Amino acid sequence: MYLSIPQLTAALSIRDLTDPEQGPHALQDLLDDVITSLTRAWSIPAELQRTTGLVATTDNYDRLGYAPDDVTRDARYSRHASPTVMLRSHTSAGIPAVLDSLADIEQPYDRLHVLPGLVYRRDAVDRTHVGTPHQVDLWRLNARGLLGEADLRSMAAAVVEAVLPGARWRTVPANHSYTSHGLQIDVETPAGWLELAECGLVRAGILRTSGLDPRRWSGLALGMGLDRALMLRKGVDDIRLLRSPDPRIAAQMLDLQPWRPVSLMPAVRRDLSILCNPDADEETLGDAAREALGPEAEILESLVIRARTPVEQLPAAAVVRLDAQPGQVNLLIRLTLQALDRTLTDTEANALRDRVYLALHEGHVLELAAG
């Protein structure tokens, strides 16, 4: 399950839209608004820290309090380079180094630490998910007075106001390995309540691990997906638009003005019938489909499992036709293909369909659209 050198190179070469050095993007404006809102509310400075996507597995999990058997560690959902190194699954992986850097500070301290960037996951393929979303961790660390739940709620209010000025919002309890009194922040949209971020008070154990005395140190931690936040702010309904090279679209991704719809090319649908491992799900299949398509993965709008049938429940004729093996499952999958800049021909759609099929199907009998 370890990534190859070409896979690592491809992942680390993906443009980070939050980084001004890689070109301007509206994500940077949104992040600036969030930072300004918090620093003004608290009258404290902010420190922005960018780190590499490759991190120690201990920083991504152990030092953030994740249990050894936590499902998030499963290699099916995370992307490991070796037993001890991985592509970070959240920007929180940079927090242990931040906390370590504070161990020798004796004077009063109160600062907002901002850690934005890409994270790497095996995720479903649809209009709101990609395998490399942008995230930001916002941690206020304080050594001159204990921070509490009132401070946490003021943090949530400042973030919501920066992302969606005037929006109604609410909080519901949430559990995190590195916080206590955790909250999920939801905002009201025309489609209903949607999650915007999660936050909590930094757990004493996380501070102690870095040599920080929780009787003196305290903190607030908030994590937010920046892609979703920008989509909500601008009214964009397809995450692929954030990276589109189409000039009509790209020009609109340079500011926070409301999205002005452009005429998109028609979608093409292709159905697949595949055999695979019973543990296969839309996250792992979506990741494999993206890998198979490479640079053309942006054409895949969605991958949906429409039916799941254990081989033992298939008609005898289907078992023979597919050469299905005991323990496998037969999945009916629908692919929706849509290029944002051109109309796909049937030949192109069939070729893309077959590349995904060959990557996902674990049977010997092949049913290829292109022949």
Image (tube, helix red, strand yellow):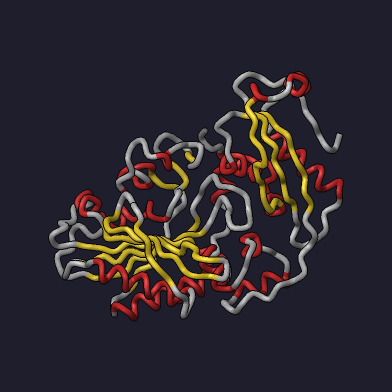
User: Which residue appears at 85% of the width and 38% of the height?
Assistant: 370
**250, above or below 67, in the image:** below
Q: Position of residue 132 (x, y in %)?
A: 55, 53
Residue 145, by quadrant, is bottom left
Give percent across and percent down for residue 243.
64, 62
Relative depth, front residue between 304 and 262? 304
The one nearer the camera, 54 or 284, is 284
Horizontal relation, residue 133 to residue 64: left or right: right
Specify whether residue 349 is in view. yes
When asked about the image quadrant of residue 142, the answer is bottom left
Could you tell me which quadrant the C terminus lies in? Answer: top right
Q: Pick whichever, 182 or 205, lies toward us.
A: 182
Res. 19 in view:
no
Image-quadrant location for residue 278: top right
Q: Is residue 318 above or below residue 112?
A: above
**Where residue 90 appears, x then y in whole percent?**
43, 52
Q: Nearer the viewer, residue 324 or 219?
A: 324
Q: Is residue 331 left or right of 205 when viewed as pictured? A: right
Does residue 318 appear left or right of residue 182 in this picture? right
Above or below 137: residue 20: below
For image coordinates 43% across by 71% down, the residue present is 169
Count of residue discs? 0
Residue located at (23% from left, 60% from top): 102
Task: Look at the picture and state if 169 lies above or below 71.
Answer: below
Horizontally, residue 56 falls left or right of residue 241, namely left
Q: Position of residue 218 (x, y in %)?
A: 21, 62
